[in-house]
Amino acid sequence: MGKVLNLGIMGAGGIAGTMAGTVNKMENVKCYAVASRTQEKADAFGQKFDVEKCYGSYEEMLADEKVDLVYVATPHSEHYENMKLCIRYKKPILCEKAFTANAAQAKEVLALAKEAGVLVAEAMWIRYMPMYKTIKEVLESGIIGEVKMVNANLGYNISHVERLMNPALAGGALLDLGVYTIHFASMILGTDVEKIESSCDLTDTGVDKQESITIHYKNGSMAVLNASMCLMSDRIGGIFGTKGYAVVENINNFETLTVYNNQYQKVAYYEAPKQISGYEYEVEACAKALEKGLTECPEMPHAETLRIMQIMDGLREDWGVKYPFEA
């Protein structure tokens, strides 16, 4: 029985609740504290999820010496300031995606964390899942030959969510959904990008409603990615090779992998292991990194977090999407 990791949650919204519910079912991790902008919200969250300490300000929670890791579950627009505050208090961080609103913010946070010797990890949960290892092993076996194309679709009808429509909160489909498709492409095809083309529809508020992104790689492979916040998609990831293809069910939380040969016959099938919610893997990765004295998780390297933030900056620049605080 190892040391119990005390998790402090910054923010008291839906995603924070998913994390709290997950941690309550984990061993060696405790949902110890929550902080919200009001004591009332913190208390309500604490009562619902049996949290020991409830704080009406972020600073109060960060001053608590018993907090071992802070999960940042606030809107994208707040991540930058929230993480800088955590670093000032020397608190290790697991921050929800998108890591920050733009690459300049990400670069500064990572530099500050490095200087302070503080662990910072992006909570891009699919990177930490055991199913990702399965997908990699299957592709490396050569069963579908050389991978030449990837496609990924992720869409939910969530444009009614105020946060997503608000430019001041870094709204839009890209930072919430498109980021998953870009990560999926990177996880399969790597980082050697030659050029990126895209098209996008904007909302009346000026954020991206849906987009199609094509990434060309220097080895001749391609990724075709679609994301939307105004429709329901199949959430499928397709991986196409010279000898066959593979289909990943739910690129937002890997469920199954089905492999087909060049005769369209199913030749292999894999199911994701039973999980609490999937959030547990990123928490476990942080716990291991802290035990080893690391300042980043090998599953989600800082260089990759920064590179994908830069890709999203370039896309938004092409679309003319700028957040008010970036002026």
Image (spheres, grey):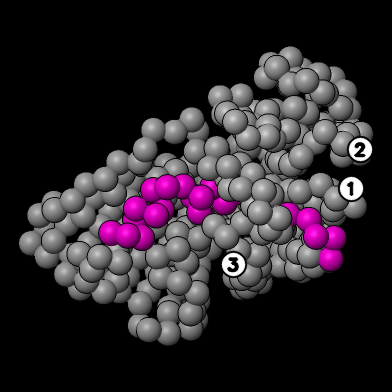
Q: Nearer the viewer, residue 139 or 249?
A: 139
Quadrant assignment, res 312: bottom right
Give the residue displayed 61% in from the left and 41% down from the top.
Answer: 283
For marks 1 and 3, give the CA distance. Answer: 25 Å
Q: Quick one: which residue is furthest to the front in this view?
A: 1
- Residue under circle 2? 63
Q: Which residues are magenta?
A: 115-138
Identify residue for label 3: 304
Residue identifier under label 1: 89
Rendered position, 236 above or below 283:
below
Q: Amino acid at mark 3?
A: Glu
How many angstroms separate mark 2 from mark 1 (CA)?
7 Å
The dot on residue 292 is none
Residue drawn 39% across the image and 54% down it:
133
Q: Is-magenta flag for residue 176?
A: no
Q: Which amino acid is tagged 1?
A: Tyr
Asked if one can make out residue 207 in the rendered structure from this viewpoint, the answer is: no
In the figure, is residue 229 to the left or right of 8?
left
State the SS at label 2: loop
Residue at (29% x, 49% y) in the render:
257
Q: x, y percentage for residue 307?
A: 61, 70
Closer to the N terminus: mark 2 or mark 3?
2
